[in-house]
Every structure is written in structure tokens, then in C-alpha cells.
Image (tube, helix red, strand yellow):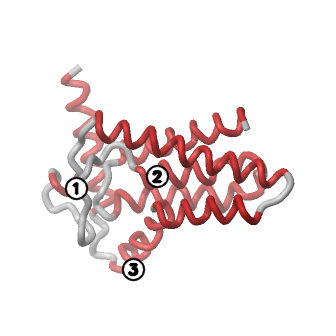
Amino acid sequence: MEKTLLWIQAQDSALFCKINRNKHISVYHQLMSIITHLGGAYFTITFGIAALLLSAGSWKAVSLQSAAALCVSHVIVALLKRKVWRKRPYLIVDQAFVIHNPLEDSSFPSGHTTAIFSLLTPYMLYSPIFLPVLLPVAILVGISRISIGLHYPSDVLIGALIGTTTALAAAAFI
């Protein structure tokens, strides 16, 4: 088991370096620094509340699914961050690029990625016409978390799975 975990960590670090080492492209870094905020608490909570207040008809149910998935997924993320302590990559990987004022809590899983997937998945399920726009946005938030040095790819992948799974559950029960 330990060999497997070490192999996963090595692969995770290698992929992290490939994505994170674009630091010489300042426009790329600036764009990723903006995109990452789409998965942050301010945006996701504001969007969720606004959607609940402004939606009507069947869209109201979709907005409720989205808000419920966001709430449930955050509980799961909070529990996992306490249970599975993982140092952030910039603390381990030599010469990792990281934004200023970096976070020091657990890297696993990515809360921003979880949030954006839990928030947007119900809308993609209800109206697939939004899929070509919303899915790339969600994926870019995940990539941005690696690009700015705060998460490993596996943190982002698990965050996307948690967000998507909670959204699917909310859609099934609401």
C-alpha cells in the first residue's frame, strides 16, 4: 500500500509541475488567478443565493439542487480536510510557482473545484445546452488551482468527483 501511495504522489507531483511551471507566461498566470475565484466562497455562495431568489418554475428546483449540493459538498470537504491532512504542493515541490498569501490548510481535496462542480452540475443536467460553456468553466477552475500552486491534480480530481456526486444526489432527491 505504501508503495502505491508513493507512486501516486510521484505521478501527482510530476503532473503538478507540468501544469504549474507555466509561470513565465504572465498573462496565463493572471488569467488563472482570476478564474480561480469562480470556485471561491464569495462567488459560489452569491451565485447560489441569487439563483434561488431570481429563479422561477422548474429553474427554482434546479437552483435548489445546486444550493443543496454546494452545502453538502462543503461539509464533505471540511471533514476530509481534517481527516486527510496533505501539505500543499508549494510546501513540498521545489520551485513550485505559488500566488502570494498562500493557504496553509490541507490541500486535499480542492474546495474551489468541489464548489464549482456542485454549483454548476445541476444546470448542466437540467439544460445540456449549457454544457459547452459551464463544463469548461468548472474544469478551468480546477486547472487554476494547480496553476497557482495550491493543489495537486488528484486534489482537483477528487474535488470534481465530490462536487459532481453531490449534485447528482441532489438532482435525484430534490
Disc marking residue 19: none
Left or right side of 156 for 108: left
Disc marking residue 27: 3
> What type is the residue that disc 2 sits on?
Thr
Relative depth, front residue between 23 and 53:
53
> What type is the residue that disc 1 sits on?
Glu
Label 3, label 1: how many angstroms apart (C-alpha)?
A: 26 Å
Q: Is residue 134 above or below residue 84?
A: below
Disc marking residue 113: 2
- Please tell me which residue is depicted at 27% across the width and 69% down the height of the picture: 99
Q: Element under label 1?
A: loop
Label 3 vs label 1, nearer the camera: 1
Relative depth, front residue between 42 and 152:
42
The image quadrant of residue 130 is bottom right
Relative depth, front residue between 53 and 144:
53
On the rendered image, what quadrant is the C terminus found in?
top right
Q: Position of residue 111 (x, y in %)?
A: 42, 50
Residues marked 3 and 1 touching at CB (< 8 Å):
no
- The residue at which mark 1 appears reads as 104
- Return the residue found at the far top: 1
Q: Is residue 57 above or below residue 125?
A: below
Q: Position of residue 35 (x, y in %)?
A: 47, 68
